[in-house]
Amino acid sequence: MGATAVVGAAPGSIVVVRDEEWLVTATEPTTGGALLHVQGLSELVREVEASFYTSLDRIEVLDPAAATVVADGSPGYRSSRLWLEATLRKTAVAMTEEALTASTQGLARPLAYQQSAVRKALDPANLRVRILLADAVGLGKTLEIGMILSELVRRGRGDRILVVTPRHVLEQMQHELWSRFALPFVRLDSAGIQRVRQKLPATRNPFAYFKRAIISIDTLKSDKYVAFLAKHRWDAVVIDESHNLTNTATLNNRLARLLARTSDALILASATPHNGRAESFAELIRLLDPSAVHPDGSLIEDEVKRLVIRRHRSSPEVAQVVGADWAERRDPLLLPVKPSPAEDAVADELERVWLHPGKGRSPYSGQTASLFPWTLAKAFLSSPAALAETIQERMKRVSATDAPGSEAELEALDRLLGLTTTALASPSGKYKALLRHLSDTGVGPGSSMRVVVFAERVKTLGWLRKQIQKDLRLGEGAVAVLHGGLPDHKQLDLVKSFKKESSPIRVLVTGDVASEGVNLHLQCHELVHFDIPWSLIRIEQRNGRIDRYGQKIPPRITTLVLDPSGEQFAGDVRILAKLIEREHEAHRALGDAASLIGAHNVEAEEEMIRRVLAGEKKLEDVVRTPDEVLAGDDFDAFFWRVAEENDETKATREPAVGALAPEWQGTGLYADTLTFLDEALHEAYTNPGSPADNSGVAWRRHDNHGVAELVPPHDLLQRLEVLPQDYLSERHVARLLKLATTRERGEQQLAAALDDQSDCIWPESHYLAPLHPVLEWARSRSRHILPCTTCTAST
């Protein structure tokens, strides 16, 4: 092919620079002349990415008109077909294409309501993909994220992607994106960052090194990473649990504003996307599209509808689709519990002296006399162990001061501590009720039954673990404790283990660190509230761990309700029990319990409930019914109008409710991806089945089992370095890469990874989805075939 000195190279052109051939992938004007971004084609620079300035290098554009066409002598025109297939695979699908492509060909079951979320995100009416995924807990926002990212990649708008999540769901998100969509993300947790530091100089921007990374928001918001991010652009950014971004005075918000400016597509995800205040929700909307918010901060309703997706379990679009794959939650089970005599004595002391002291006041000597007694009550309702810890901490602080009334408070605290110590030494009524419930549920030696037990205080968690392990005679590791004080990797290991059928864990005793974003439903359908959160949001978050899509058995939520003999304290506990019932009503009617109180903040809800317990307000005035929420004129009602998009608009944009998107037909050159990979290997190697040390890759197809395998050559290994490190090491991918070649086998392998006896959650044979790196490798090799076989150079 002839070379000319014409520099006007467009993407797709082939140029000669420094005696090597390059494919132009992008061009941009600069003050120093045109800048060409290229990918190497000739042998010496194959797959190398580089950039050249026209002012610094002699750049020659190969003229296609000067090519001499020669016959393709390969079997069945294999070379030409591979080159065409590789070119078509490299060519981005148009953003206006209505059919979904890669997102429906992974291991995510194509549910209509999830596809409608993808279609709305990709709507050609939007110049950029900017969307808030606000589906209620359990609907599969992670899968929707994976589907949207897959489509962006296939449409040529997802080369560089950053995913930001809370640290305790890093691995879960990474696992879903790789296992179901073949989208590899480098996990930059503490271990991942250390690995990067070993590879890169301290001054090198790590985000320029990795095209796709997943990192926790707590890590990323630090100043040193913000400086790196400010110099980098992304094709797409995902921020999970985005309700943590709305406070403009926080580092989270600073990070979100920076990423919103430096990314094309922005996907925010949260099941609780607002805190009841229009100005906070407006901050989320500004991140997506500033033009959707008036200068005075008011929201443009039609614009917000375009940017927000919100459904819940009972939405018609969801209810008729999920069926047996999301079993209906049973009515909540409230178990009244008689306290032991020693516990009842503590409850009586709390009621008479601290909570309801008649015409006097509590012995508290601090500035918040109305608050601390309820802190004691809340600790006691968690466990006597938690109350003892709270009393001891308060006594230390009081002893260090000489405030007026401190002696009387210390005396009252000492008396309460004595009663609590006696209660700790005797059998607990609530604990015995928990033990009976666990036994009745089927937890015991030799049983596979599992239960998640939630409690608020860490002291309660440790006390429960020790007692349950002994009294149920369970084996080592059968009772595990999960709380926020554990290191990252310990939290991840516990959650990973609990998902597996082979896990020894039968009772997971956890604090509220597991109430947000963690999936515990794969092997468990029983949940117990050992104490009652004073927040509807927290109750909903806890319940959502087992009540979510993929739950095959109707989940049961059990709450232990203490019933002390003191009339006022017993009434307080009954008020708390009503929160469980109200959350259940909201779950069915709204899919969101936060709107009932309207504070949309755990701490604010707790304060409102404390005022109810103190007799300052009535429960009915603080906690609304679902009907009252929908009929209101506040921001909650506005949000539900936005979420319940009018049927006429939806009908013009989408197929009928429940209908799936049109199936992508592919290129038509090959029946499936396996055939393409097989042909590419036979073109690249004389005998691909030969051992790797004999000019082959040990290629084997086991069609009867839906599996294929090969030993990755050096250039493929380089591409696989960005795969999850756990997957690479635990599945020994460098020695043998195993591929599931049918969707059925892929799903079986993914399920088996959660059932087997090892600690590995990664499938042994990874599904050969359209975006799999091995197919990208085969495509790249095939793109280099034709210039060497069908073109001759001419000058």
Image (spheres, rainbow, N blue to C red):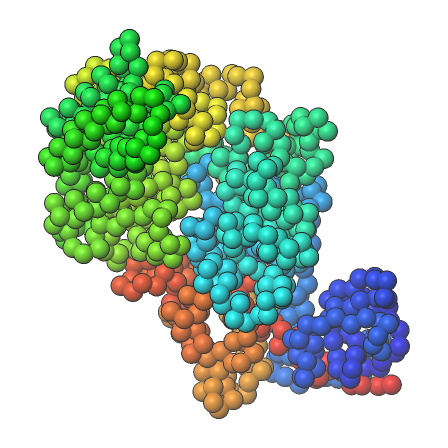
At a point 39% along the width and 23% down the height, the residue shown is 368
- Is 102 placed above or below 49 here? above
- Is 250 placed above or below 361 here? below
Q: Position of residue 765 (x, y in %)?
A: 40, 67
> Which image quarter holds the N terminus?
bottom right
Q: Position of residue 733 (x, y in %)?
A: 43, 73
Can you tell which quarter of the image residue 487 is in? bottom left
Can you tell which quarter of the image residue 396 is in? top left
Can you tell which quarter of the image residue 537 is in? top left
Q: Position of residue 708 (x, y in %)?
A: 43, 73
Q: Residue furthest top?
A: 359
- Is 160 placed above or below 403 here? below
Q: Is residue 512 visible?
A: yes
Identify which residue, 426 or 369, lies in the foreground: 369
At a point 42% along the width and 50% down the height, the residue shown is 168
Q: Is residue 668 visible?
A: no
At a point 85% along the width and 66% down the height, the residue shown is 32
At a point 33% along the width and 41% down the height, the residue shown is 511
Q: How many marks?
A: 0
Q: Position of residue 79 (x, y in %)?
A: 64, 79
Q: Residue furthest bottom?
A: 694
Q: Is residue 168 left or right of residue 46?
A: left
- Is 155 placed above or below 426 here? below
